[in-house]
Amino acid sequence: MAWNEPGNGQKDPWNRNRPGGRKPDLDGAIKNLKARFGRFGAGSGGILAIVGVFVLAWLLVSSYTVIDARQVGVVLRFGQFSRILPPGFHLKAPSPIESVTKVETTQVRSISDNVSMLTRDENIITIDFNVQYQVSDARKFLYSNADVENGTIPNAAEAAVRSVVGANAMDNILTTPGTDTPAPDQAPVAGVATQAKETLQQQTRDILQATLDKYDAGVTVTGVSFQNVAPPKEVKDAFDDVNAAREDKQSEENKARAYESQVVPVARGEAARIAAEAEAERVERIARANGDVERFNLLLKEYRAAPDVTRRRLWLETVEEVMAGNPKIIDGSGGKNIIQLPVEGGPNATVRSVPGVGTVVQSATTEPATQGNAQ
Amino acid sequence: MKILSGLIVVAVVLLAFNSAFMVKEGENALLLQFGRIVRADYAPGLHFKIPVVQQVMRFDNRILGLDAQPERYFTLEKKSVNVDFYVKWRIADNASYYRATSGEQTQAIQRLTPIVKDALRYEFNARPLEDLIAGGRKDITERVRQQTDAVARKNLGIAVVDVRIKRIDLPDEVSGSVYKRMRAERLQLANELRYTGQESAETIRADADRQKMVLLADANRDATKVKGDGDAQAAAIYAQAYSQDPEFFAFYRSLAAYRKAFADGKGVLVLKPDSEFLRYLNDGPGRSR
């Protein structure tokens, strides 16, 4: 059939498939008849034949319908709702007794809008929202509301969005909650807290569905989404500055934490070093004491065996070592001589008397020392 | 003759067609006889009438919309707002609707709009803005619906299905001050964030310094204790050994001290000839005792 190929319901020359589209009506048919009648002139037999052929063709063409897989057909008999046809080929009473209107039911339809609205705390925000819906009841969809797609649904959607926005304070809608939340990542979508957004979308969807059910619109709202919830552009820079401030705060704290994570471990290392050194010192002291004692004990054994000899030996060894390493002066004058010490004395040499020996002359130092401190 | 009979046939057919009419789904109809209403309510389907004499007037039986221009109202606190609303209505009574509007939708809307606007005005004037924006809206519109429904049914044969507010906007001159306020609030928040950031950073730093000091102080304290322990143990070891012969220890320790004192080679020793060390030097070859 050239007029009615399956998969395309738009080719039926009489039934245009728009809801509310023109249908072939009785008046048109009569005009047609009259025109033919006039053109063919006299002869009632001829006229009857022509009319018969015409009616037959009409019956052939208008006694069946093909419903596409994505559609259902709503059948009216004498204008009254009769039945819903599923997809496929169906016979029907010829027009104008029965007429079929086809409605797309699988297709997801959507509307979008951008609005600016007052929140409960009398701030203004802008929202891009999108509503998706499907026809769930073709009969209601066609015959309950005038202008359902361009009037009813957009209006109801806007009213639903507005009532949800109006019931919430701005900070519930935008992400500007307390300081305890992490800074929002710089997504292009204005910061809407996912949780809050989900809730708002759900509320909007519920309100919208309830509204449309009240109007018997025959549609199911499959989704409401807020693509972009933002402060109005007039104050956008101030809001951006808050985000920047949040970033600043974060980076200040991060810097401080970096300082902390550097200072504390270093101090911990220092503390460990101090502890280790102390321990080493302790061990070393004890070891040395043990060594000294060991040596002393050996010497003591010797001494106990021959006290006098050992004493003298030790004494002599000591004096020998002391005498060998230092300049010596033997003075038997009983303190009457001036002893010139072999030092590089400057012009300002002091003269001191050492009891029991002669007067000692040496170069000046910052402080008069009793021990010879000559350079 | 043939032509006459043909004409008669055509006339009969035309009259037959004219005596039936169809009311479609979503429509309703009114039957008029010379302007007088005969019957005002037809369900969808095929109906019959007297041809020529009676006329059918069809009405849209679906829910119809009224989307008016935004209206400016004053709230209880004398704030001015622009209110954009829509109304859903349907023809409730064909006869009185026809009488009131002669079946013209545009006329119906013209009559209905002021009724709704007045009811809304009354509600808006009696309430503060916040209530109007927020939760109160539902019952406000429901009350408006009830009032307008009562009036419209009586006067126009119209049922008001729903009244909903699409937008409440502040006029431009007021929006300016709202923006100013929003800006100030954000500025305050930004400042607060920055200052609390600095504050907590300071706190973190101070805490880090404190931790450092505590760590080092604790370490030093423990180190002193450990060293002291070493000293004590060493002292005990020495004491235990030296107390075997204190006199010899004094002698031995003094010698060690002399060695150490003169180790730098900078002391000048002035000796008397009769010192113990020079005993044999002075004596010449001593005799053995």
Image (spheres, coloured by chain):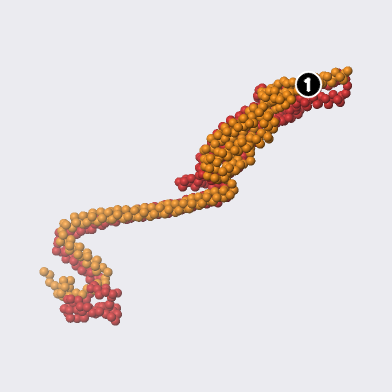
Task: Give the quadrant of the C terminus of chain A.
Answer: bottom left
Task: Give the quadrant of the N terminus of chain A.
Answer: top right
Does residue A338 sit above or below A249 in this rendering?
A: below
Q: Chain of mark 1?
A: B
Does residue A70 sit above or below A113 in this rendering?
A: above
In depth, the one of A240 and B224 nearer the eye is A240
Does residue B233 sit above or below A354 in this rendering?
A: above
Give the residue displayed 78% in from the left and 25% down from the top.
A29
In depth, the one of A166 and A206 nearer the eye is A166
- Answer yes or no: is residue B229 visible: yes
Secondary-structure class at tag 1: helix
Across and down, in percent, residue B101 comes to 68, 32
Give the residue displayed 34% in from the left and 53% down from the top.
B214
Give the residue displayed 20% in from the left and 65% down from the top.
B255
Inspect the image, locate mark 1, and give the three-letter code of the amino acid beneath it: Leu
| Quarter of the view holding residue A313 | bottom left
- Dot 1, how many residues are within 10 Å of its Cα: few (below 14), some (14-19), or many (20+)? some
Residue B217 relative to residue B150: left or right: left
Which chain comes out red in the rendered image? A
Residue A59 relative to residue B212: left or right: right
Give the residue displayed 68% in from the left and 23% down from the top.
B39
Across and down, in percent, residue A59 comes to 76, 21
Q: Which residue is mark 1?
A: B15
Tell me, what hue is chain B?
A: orange
- Answer yes or no: is residue A93 visible: no
| Quarter of the view holding residue B264 | bottom left
Across and down, in percent, residue A103 comes to 66, 29
Does residue B67 sit above or below B272 in this rendering?
A: above
Across and down, in percent, residue A308 comes to 14, 64
